[in-house]
Amino acid sequence: MSAPILDARTLAAREWDLLVVGGGITGAGILLEAARRGLRALLVEQRDFAWGTSSRSSKLVHGGLRYLAEGQLRLTRESVREREALLREAPGLVEPQGFAFADHGAGWAQRLGFLAVLRVYDRLAGRREPHWESADGFAMLAPNVRREGLLGGVRYTDAKTDDARLVLRVLDEARSHGAAALNYVAVRGLVREGARVMGARLLDERSGQEHAVRARVVVNASGAWAGALAGALTGNGAGPRLRPLRGSHLILPSWRLPLAQAVSLRHPEDRRPVFAFPWEGATLVGTTDVDHGEGLHLEARITRAEFDYLMAALRAAFPQLSLHDEDVIATYAGVRPVIDGGSHGAPSKEKREHVVWSEPGLVSVTGGKLTTFRAIALDTLRHALPQLPGWRPDLAPQPVFAPVPLPVSRLLPAGVLRRLAGRYGASAQDLVDAAGEGELDPIPGTCTLWAELRWAARAEQVRALGDLLLRRTRLGILLPKGGAAHLERVRAICQPELGWSDDEWLAEQAAYMASWRECHGIPAASSSPEHRCLTR
């Protein structure tokens, strides 16, 4: 069963070894690695778990082929190792994804260079697979790709995931080791004794009450917000300079852009790589890589220029499909916490390594990538180690997830049971058992079961309708208009579980739909970068 949900007041009465600030994949990973090594660890997130970058990534668990081509061998080796570990340990959540890269006349030298990089990529993963396909063979892998001038193509294998569910699964694993995690709890300041940080003042957004919590070490793992939070809390500019970069994406129905493989292509304007791949029964397209000039207190959204940029790439690669703006189901954008290299060059040239810095009682971490969250967590704990006398852990990598059995149900096929085990871990059987009549059926147009909504509302700290539809499930970006056509049944299942009154439900529904239109719809041709996306 899911761990009991505690409130900020109860948790503030305890003393903690580690207080982690930030409920994305980095914070979740740190919480898990600390708890499994015996630390009393608490995580707080001022919005919802995975609200920021960790539910808005490109959904890829990849070794970083581009990083290898740029000579970043250490980062690539680490990424490949972590990718392979997640493929082994999280079946049903992290799955292999084939990639196909069309060659429309790149030139033999570039082609041979790419194949050589792929051979190194294979060796790092301990695998070997063929990479070159003839024009006819490539057309079978990607039948809708432009045939004019097609000489063949390259294929290779990476992996994909549901990034928000990955965060939630890591948090559940941490709770199984005694950790605690709360969403909608913000840090309002630090508790100090002299120059040393001894905890933090927490504001429970639900009750409006403030509580002081003591901890031997506070870890600032707030991602793109880490630099600003560190400065606000400490009053100094310590730490690296961040360059927030926005990556925006499109979701199309699979019948409009059917793909068996992920297709990588070069944008016709600037030759940047763009990809499209099958994800959760739809087709995901991305990504842009631009400076995010807006305030981080606002929810990121795609601009019209980014939307047109991605659509231009699709129309050039798949001309026979005649794709239009109206074919896009939803959009989303996230802000990456990238370290500013100081060169003021193209955003895509910035390195993706993480960085950790500290002062007495406070450790901050930012940068890095989704794939390497375990390595980032362990590195952060190494920096915290000197500030935790008496703690002598083995910081060698351990499996991220304990093995879990498949849930049992005569009504569900093996593939669905595997998917549930991957996403919900030890809670998968409880989810199945809690299902009402007809709730083990998939929601039309998705791979999501109605029962997943009930379980999320019952056991996964849902505080807003957006939590339920954008992060616990992904219905808000997989269904037209954010799933509006299904909201009555969603209400029938979830309102009793959440304990919301009719007025509360209607207010949440109105807020969700307004936010969806602003932050996940198709931007108007005249849209301005300024906007007011709701933070929920």
Image (spheres, grey):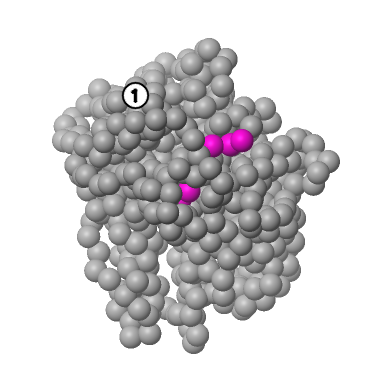
Q: Tell me which residue sits at (79%, 46%) in the image.
A: 524
> Which of these two is toward me, 46 or 361?
46
Q: Position of residue 297 (x, y in %)?
A: 65, 36
Q: Position of residue 52 (x, y in %)?
A: 54, 42
- To which residue does mark 1 refer? 72
Q: Position of residue 454 (x, y in %)?
A: 50, 72
User: Is residue 533 found left or right of 391 in the rendered image?
Assistant: right
Q: Tell me which residue sits at (54%, 37%) in the image.
A: 266
Magenta segment main secondary structure: strand
> Which of these two is toward me, 381 or 102?
102
Q: Tell me which residue sits at (48%, 80%) in the image.
A: 441
* Residue 346 quadrant: top right
* Range of magenta residues: 262-268
Q: Tell me which residue sits at (42%, 45%) in the image.
A: 152
User: Is residue 500 found left or right of 111 in the rendered image?
Assistant: right
Q: Is residue 315 above or below residue 17?
A: below
